Amino acid sequence: MTPRLSPWQLGATLYMPAVRDDIADVILHNKIPGLRSLVICLEDAIGEDDLPQALHNLQQVLNSLNAARQSAGGAHWPLVFIRPRHSEMGAWLVENCDLAAVDGLVLPKFTRDSLPVWWQILEHSHLSLMPTLETEEVFDVLQMRELAETLQQHPVRSRILALRIGGNDLMNILALRRSRHYTLYDSPMGYTIQMLIAVFGSRDFALTAPVCEHIDDRQIMDSELALDIAHGLVGKTAIHPSQIAIIEQALMVSASDHEDALRILNSSQAVFKSQGAMCEPATHRRWAAAILARAQVYGIAPEAGQPLRRFSAGYLPEI
């Protein structure tokens, strides 16, 4: 069974401004079906003038969650994260709020220089961390390699659930906005995502995909999701509930990949042919393990005309 705090459990991570008055209802009463994880945002989604109201609202949400947790437990809730505005706000939250019902923090504008500050704040908490890579340093492969090596050797490593790629902030640094007609991979972010995967993925860090801000363009969304998954990203930021089912569907594993993964992990042959392609367990084993882990959460995509059956591990095809 996949643990609750696993990168594969993130799915479509919905960002919700902390000023919304229905956050507790969304978490406690399944108001948004299929939601696996959400981020209560106190950063870019909140204007300065709205910050006092956002913090007050967050406190009310925490009160509701903690009361429900004490009476019924929160095992079936979505994963809940808070994104503070900066490290000073992160420290205030840890010192002044009961975060027992919260799974972790999303760390904005994360850099190698900010690591000691964040670790001092969070070392003695239970919180998991999702640092966001969204500053100018992200475009420098040498600085990213230094950050990856530092994180790999630091005690924070065991607390990092995934690294989030802040696509819009990175495009803003380049004075760009994503095109309405192309995926993010058709912009400078294509290189950036590939570089981050090479640097961090090779060190066993999970990375999540940036948001697709064109909410009503299903073709662009589908194309981008296919590329996200081809690059090994474990989930995707969502900004609208309508994106959740689309992301979940894309994360399902194809029957052919599932079959190959099983054969790779169970074969005694060094090399064999499967479905017209070479399978080499020595070099495909990690891919196969990831495919099975993803399938356990999201299930196997049905072939055309094949119904779905709900299982505890996700959606599996009717047999």
Image: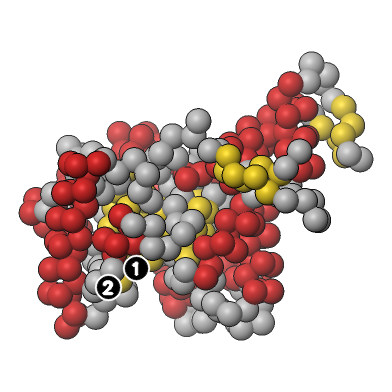
Q: Identify the secondary structure beneath mark 1.
A: strand
Residue 115 seen from this side:
no
Callout 1: few (<14), some (14-19), or many (20+) C-alpha neighbours within 10 Å? many
Q: Horizontal placement of 129 versus 279: left or right?
A: left
Residue 93: assigned label:
none
Tell me the quadrant of the picture where the C terminus can be found: top right
Pick whichever, 5 or 189, lies toward us: 5
For the residue pair 106 and 282, the one nearer the viewer reads as: 106
Residue 297: where, in percent of width, then height? 55, 42
The answer for how far apart the CA atoms under marks 1 and 2 are is 7 Å
Label for residue 20?
2
Question: What's the residue type where badge 1 is placed?
Answer: Met
- Residue 302, percent from left and from top: 74, 49
Q: Residue farthest to the top? A: 268
Q: Is residue 236 above or below residue 218?
A: above
Q: Residue furthest left?
A: 96
Q: Residue at x 54, y 49 (%)?
A: 234
**Residue under numbered circle 1:** 16
Vertically, is 148 above or below 24? above
| Residue visible at 24% across and 80% down in the picture | 47
Residue type marked 2: Arg
